[in-house]
Image (spheres, grey):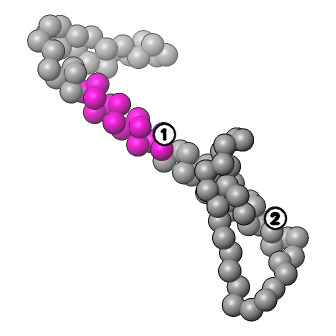
Amino acid sequence: MPMFIGEKPIGVITLYHLMQKDFREEELHFLEIMANMISVALERSEYYIRAGREKEFADTIIQSVTDGIITVDTTTGDIGEFRL
């Protein structure tokens, strides 16, 4: 069963059975749903990892700058960091 994120193929799920078996339509549909859920979980985990790396990078930059820095959340207007 192929796994996709949108139109992009990202992997395959293979299902084995001990004996020769023709899978019913409901079983194949269930496997397709599981493949879609796993695809979404993989995509989200990649975003989570990338966001963590970007935060570490931004924190390193902020800590290494000797000038004053103010960070502002543009969606809420909250001041996140003030450094002199």
Position in image of residue 68 (x %, y %): 17, 7
Residue drawn at the location 87% of the way across and 76% of the way down: 24
Q: Secondary structure at mark 2?
A: helix
Residue drawn at the location 41% of the way across and 35% of the way down: 51
Q: Which mark is residue 47?
A: 1
Residue drawn at the location 41% of the way across and 43% of the way down: 49
Position in image of residue 40 (x %, y %): 61, 49
- Which residue sits furthest top? 67
* Observer-nearest of 33 and 75: 33
Position in image of residue 72 (x %, y %): 36, 13
Position in image of residue 17 (x %, y %): 70, 85
- Which residue sits furthest right? 25
Magenta-colored span: 46-59
Q: Which mark is residue 29?
A: 2
Q: Reply yes or no: does residue 67 show up in magenta.
A: no
Q: Which mark is residue 63?
A: none
